[in-house]
Each structure stands twice: as C-alpha cells, then as structure tokens.
Amino acid sequence: MIRVFCIVISLCISWGLIARDKKEFFPKKNLTTVGAYYYPEHWDESQWDRDLRKMSEMGFEFTHFAEFAWAQLEPEEGKYDFAWLDKAIAIAAKHNLKVILCTSTATPPVWLTRKHPEILIKNENGTTVDHGARQHASFSSTFYRQYSLKMIAELAKRYGKDSRVMGWQLDNEPGVRQDYNTDALLRFRSFLRNKYNNQIQELNKAWGTAFWSQIYSSFDQINFPLPSNWGQNPHQMLDYRRFTAYESASFLDEQAAEIRKYSTSEQWITSNYIPDYWAGHIGKSKLFDFYSYTRYIVSGGLGIGQKGYRIGDPMLIPFANDYFRPIGGMYGVMELQPGQVNWGTVNPQPYPGAVRLWLWSVFAGGSDFTCTYRFRQPIYGDEQYHAGIVGTDGVTPSRGGLEYQQFITDIAKLRKLYNPKAQLPAEYTKRKTAILHNVDNTWSMSKQKQTVEWNTDNHIQKYYKPLKSFGAPVDVVNEEADWNKYPVLIAPAYQLVDDQLIEKWTNYAKQGGHLVLSCRSGQKDRFDRLFEMPFGGKMVNLIGAKMDFFDLLVPSDPGTVQMNEKNYPWVSWGEVFTPDSQTEVWGTYVNDFYAGKAAVLHRKLGKGSVTYIGVDSSDGSLEKDVLKRVYALNGTSLMNLPQGVWMEYRDGFGIAVNYGPEAFEFPLNNKARIVIGEKKIPLAGVLVWEE
Ligand code: GAL
C-alpha cells in the first residue's frame, strides 16, 4: 500500500502535478556538488572518454554540454544532429557525471544569420554586429525567437526525459544590450502601449514631454532614447531600461516554457547571470527554478594589500550569494574562475589557495553547486590564454585544477559529518539583515547623478561591508518580500517610492523592525519625477524631519559629520535636516554654513525604529558606526572581523575566509570543533568548523 502511494506521488511529481521542494534537485546530504564545462565539439572524439574519465577521477560530479553548439546541433536548417551529443552524454554517464545542457542561443549558426540578417543586433550608429563572435543575435527579433524555440524544442524532445541530464542553462550570461534592431523598436512601442493603456496622453504626462517640446501624438512616433543625445529625456530612458530587462526575461521565459513541454520536473531550469546589479533583468524570468551566477574574481582589480590583486575583492562572492539566493530560495554558481582569465585588464596567476578560497566562499552562502568554466584550456579561438582545470595538453591539472580537487576532497569529509538536524547559532540568526534593492533607483541616479563623486554601488557597499564584518547573514530583497523576518532592513539610496512603499516601511517599523534609510531616498516617484511638494517631503512623516536642502562638495573641500564626538569625512552627498521634537539627532554637520544642523536622524516608531543617514561618508565609517548603534537597540551581539575576513554558517558548519592582507586569528567559541584549517587563518586561507 505504502509502495503504491509512493509510486503515485513520484509520478505526480515527475508529471509536474505536485510542486517539488526545490532543495530536492540537489540532495541535502551532499551539501554541494562540483562540475566543469566541457565542449565535446572542440576536441577530437577519441579524447572524450579520456577527458571525462579524468574529470570524474578528479572528483567532479557533473559536466556541462552544448553551450555554444547550435551550428553542430542544427548544421542545416531543420536538419538536426544529436549523434555527437548522445555519445558525449553516454560517456559522461559511464563516468558517473550528470549533465547540464544548454540552449546555445548565444551563438546562432551562420546559415541563419545569412538567411535572416535582420536577426542581428543593431548598434546606435546603425551598424550591425556580424557572425564571427558570439551574442550577436537580437533577443527582440521575431525570427530569432522562432528559430531558437524550434531548435530548443528538438533538444528538449530528445533529452527532456533523460535522467542523465539534471538541468538546463538557458542562453549564456543573458545580458541586456543596447539594441536598435527594428523588431526591438516595434516591441518597445508595444511595451509602452501596454504600460500606458494605449493612451499617449498618459505617456506624455509620465515622461514630462511638456518639457522641451517633446509631446507625442502617437506611440508610433516614439523611438529609442539615444545615449549620445545630450539631455535625453530621463523618464524615457528609465522606461527603455525596464523594456530591455523585460525583453531579456521574456525570451528566456519562452525558452523555459518550450523545454517544460517535454521535460520531466526532475530537470531544473536556470540561466547563468553575470552579477551585474545594473542589468535589471536578473530575477525577472518567472519560469526558472532558481538563479545561478558566474563569477571571475581576479582580472586586474587590486583587492586588499600588496597581494590582493591575486586574491580579489572579498565582497564579490558574498554579495552575489546574498543577491541571488533570495530570488529563487536557492542558488548555484555556474561559472567560477579556475585560474587566469584572458580578458582582464591584467590576468595574474591567482595567489596559492585563492581558487579554493573562492570555492569555499561560494559554499559559505548556502549554494547547492559550483561549476567551473572550463575543464580544458582552449588551444584555439578567442580564449586561448584562459586557464582550465587541465592545461593545453589536455591532461595535466592546472594549479587551479588541483585546488578544485582539494575542495572536492574537503567536501567529502564534510558530507561524512553532516548532521541534518543542525541549527544555525541563535546569535547568528539574530543578526539577520535585509538590504532592499531595486535597480530602478540605480538607473535613475545614474542619469541624474548631480555629482561625479556619487557611486550607487559603492554606496550600497558602505552598508554591506560592515554587515559582513559583524558576521551578519544578509538577504538582498525586493519590495514584495516578507520583511518581517529581518530584525533590520536597510534601504540605501532608495530614490523612487510611492505611498504603498512608504506605508510598508512604516508598518515594518511599527511592528518592531529597525528600518535604516540613507540619503537620496524617497525623492522621486516611479516615473522618475520629483514630487510636487517641498523637496524630500514624502519622507517627513516616516523619518520625523524636514529636509532643508542637500549639498554636494568637491574633494578639495571635504565636509565633516560628527557623531558621539567622532568625526567622519564626506564629499559626495549630504542632506541637511530640521528634525521634529521627537526625533533624535545622532549626527551633525561640523563645518560650513550649516554647522550644527542634523545629518543622521533616529526615531522610535511603534515597536521599532527608523534611522535616516543623510550623508554618504567618504570611507563608510559613519555608516558602520550608525549600524552598530542600530543593532545595539535590541541587544544584538556583533562580531568585529577585519576588512577581508568574513564568515557564514550553513548546515552545521561555520566557514570563515581570509582575503587578506594578513593572517587572522579567528575568535572561535568553545563549542566549535575545527574540521578544516586552523584558528589562525593564513592569507587566502579557510577555516571550517562544526558547531
Ligand atoms: C564568461 C562566459 C564564458 C566564458 C568566460 C571566460 O563571461 O560566460 O562563456 O567566455 O567568461 O572567462
């Protein structure tokens, strides 16, 4: 009886009649799994068995095929060749490697491009990109979508029920490009018709077209905003950005829907996004099972200290973890750097241990898998100097390859110790913090920065970095999320608001949350227009203060804000307030004609509080000290990790990583039992413990 019940349930699941727990895609007891990209079409068939055997012997558990292989899968229109892929999948399976399949839409075959040159992306100056590279087809092209979906359907018919295939990656790093293709323009117009209820007057109002005589009488008169147009309408640009995000997501959703027609629900669907928080389309596809990202850490950036350029910026991986995980409730990393890349400003060798450090950094955020680009170093094509897990001879493990192997061995050790009942330490969960993010704000501020000193990403990092030094788990969330599970919610430079959002912020604080807002927040509506009220007027009731004005300085004459007798320098943005009598002033301006006026405000609201930091400090130290005061409000104990060191807990393990500049003695508590590494974490080192 029980057996019959189980069979019925599993059939319902595989037919998609019952939604599965996403975590089942990757068994929890395995903690994580590691794979590598392999391009059978790049190598002589006689080597496939040797290569995939080697991959498996090194401990990899899955591989990744057919990413840029449309020309090999459909060599002539309508003539498909799956024999080579069948063979490669069979060899992978023989070596116990699961397979991720890709949809190849980043590389159309030349027969398609020549037959329909109108599929190509058009640049602002009217030139079109051409065959001979990749990512040159327009996501807006009707033909391109049709041809892509036809090819994808054939692929899914063949492999959608194949248990050797675990999931699908759609396209490759689907980006948003400025695309002046004719189909794109037509689709932009219909996007606007839809948004403005086919009423051109609604659009005129939203875009403020009374300004500079820009009034339209029909949607057909609207063109793309041109970046080269000086003084281009900002409202039009914001809608164009939203369109490009929608366009990318809608193409991927069409792909996902096509695969779903033929695949079992055992196979998951995702895409591999560049963690480009400006792109705006990440998270917009509705049919994905989860989101994955790609990450290259050493490519010419300086990192911390003398050797930091070999180790990378310590925040690149954790921020991506915290950004992607909340979107789909889980995440994986589809491409992680295996060694030198070929496209950086400088492509140094990673520091000994750095590749392994990145793997642990991905793991620490709770990921289910990491895949590396790529197994073999290419010997022809555009990426010849790009490292692989094995080198140009196809057999010798690279330095990075050996570090992957080391990580895989370490994970095997953790799997043996895994305790499904393990809980996250209470003091860690108490620090749980959300950062509210909406790319519309970034777009809006990039168009009207007001000062070259302003940088939205850096501003957000001034809040994120302290959180990591406190040992706080962070989720980057959107406006729809349930914020009540986070004791602290930070909305940095949240420029575009409406009454609904302000009400949600107010209720969050009233119900006991500690809301932290920073400068530039609440200044504009969703169309990017200022409110018809005193500047900053929308925020008065929430923050308990009126804004007198804002000021922007030059680096040769920095300002100072004082809090608790400590001075903090600032240049880029400072707002000057007159607080209500109930509002506490935490920080004041020290100099200039507004010396003594309020810069940092705090007020109680219901069971919680609202803190407003009206200034963007030069080094982030003010933001850090204000956050410390906020956590002290409910007695949250914070860590004090130095720059370059951060930690997380998952599945009963604590993981601490050191991006430098020096060795660091980690303050382990008495309950901790070291599993990997030592208390004194060396440069590029890792410490893992059970707790
Ligand atoms: C990624 C891309 C890969 C490969 C890699 C090289 O951005 O998705 O296909 O080109 O860069 O580092």
Image (spheres, rainbow, N blue to C red):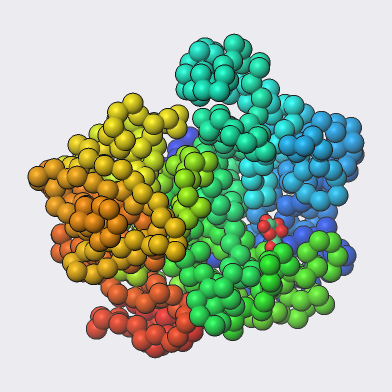
- Residue 425 sits above or below residue 84 on the image: below
Drawn side of residue 499 relative to residue 295, left or right: left
Q: Quadrant of the N terminus?
A: top left
Q: Nearer the viewer, residue 234 or 196?
A: 234
Q: Nearer the viewer, residue 43 or 561?
A: 561
Ligand 1, by image quadrant, is: bottom right
Drawn side of residue 193 relative to residue 147, left or right: left
Q: Position of residue 538 (x, y in %)?
A: 28, 34
Drawn side of residue 512 relative to residue 478, left or right: left
Which residue: 47% across, 82% down?
Answer: 661
Q: Nearer the viewer, residue 424 or 556?
A: 556
Q: Can residue 420 be seen in this snapshot?
A: no
Name the residue furthest front.
593
Which residue: 66% across, 17% down?
Answer: 221
Which residue: 26% across, 42% down?
Answer: 548
Q: Position of residue 543 (x, y in %)?
A: 21, 43
Q: Position of residue 446 (x, y in %)?
A: 51, 45
Which residue: 24% across, 56% down?
Answer: 595
**Image quadrant in which you'd find residue 89:** bottom right
Q: Nearer the viewer, residue 526 or 653?
A: 526
Q: Position of residue 144 (x, y in %)?
A: 76, 33
Q: Can residue 181 be seen in this snapshot?
A: yes
